[in-house]
Amino acid sequence: LKLISRVGIGLDSVDLLAAQKRGIKVSYTPDAPAPAVAELTIGLMLTLLRSAQLSNIEMHNGKWNRLIGRRLSEVTIGVIGVGRIGIRVLRHLQGFGSPRVLLNDILPNENIEKEFNVEWTEKETLLQESDIITIHTPLTAQTKNMVKKEHLLTMKEDAIVINTARGGIINEKDLYDVMKTGHLSGAAIDVFENEPVAPDNPLLSFPNVLSTPHMAGTTWDTWRRRAEFGFGNMDLVLREKSPLSIVN
């Protein structure tokens, strides 16, 4: 084996140390799905802020009930993880007026402040002051269960949490326990710790939990770009050249 060509952005499914020991190159295609993930993240924010998914359920049940929502420009948005996807989310947010945006990353990029009106802050402050929290970090030993019950309980009662990154970053049992008490007005979960998700997953019992089957990066154009980059990396290795976006 010469190459593991990961077609996607996450690397938690690849044993990087084992590959390194065996001299196996590992590449991935991080730029391919990023635009689609960022777009869906904005869509999830808007859906939950306006309770569109709840209105849809009520309309299908014959109820005409106008729910009062909030506008994106009027809330504080916390972004945890400001890499390829996080930056794209910031760019999309510029089209919605000037919401207050808090950022947190293990390696803060101060240059971002030159392009966006944002504030770097500690994770604890971001959790306490944000109306929406969206997560865009990889799943690592450091980010596993990064958001647990004690963190969720520090958030505002009507806050929203969104995870389009990786399952396991938010502790699902803790999220269920917190939402069962009525704390948090909603959540959007595209990624789960165990996939595919069992129908009896307790989080699916909440109408204010918007769940999707790990599809944030799934659009026709991103699938095509993934394939182009993935097979392109194989071609480069076969021609004894270094693949693009090599990890090790």
Image: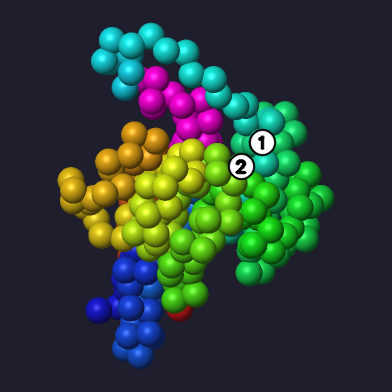
Any magenta on residue 245? no
Q: Disc 1 marks which residue?
A: 75
* Dot 1 amino acid type: Val
Q: Main secondary structure of the magenta part?
A: helix
Q: Residue furthest left?
A: 199
The image shows residue 209 at horizontal and vertical percentages of 38, 40
Quadrant for the N terminus, please. bottom left
Let me know if residue 67 appears in the view.
yes
Residue sitting nearer the eye, 1 or 174: 174
The residue lying toward the viewer, choosing from 87 and 136, is: 136
**Would residue 224 be visible to someone looking at this image?**
no
Instruction: Name the residue furthest front.
Output: 181
Is tag 1's residue or tag 2's residue first in the polypeptide sequence?
A: 1
Which residue range is magenta in the image?
40-56
Residue under label 2, please give it: 131
> Could you say which is closer to the camera, residue 117 or residue 147?
147
Residue in view at x 32 percent, y 55 percent:
192
Q: Is residue 51 above or below residue 172?
A: above
- Disc 1 and disc 2: Cα gap in Å? 6 Å
| Residue at (38% x, 9% y) in the render | 64
Kind of element beneath mark 1: loop
Instruction: Give coordinates of residue 226: x percent, y percent.
Output: 37, 51
Q: What amino acid is labelled 2 in the image?
A: Asp
Q: Local crowd at mark 1 within 10 Å, few (<14), some, or many (≥20)?
A: some
Q: Residue 108 at what x, y percent from top left?
A: 70, 64
Q: Position of residue 163 (x, y in %)?
A: 45, 50
Q: Is residue 111 above or below residue 238?
A: above
Question: The C terminus is located in which quarter?
Answer: bottom left
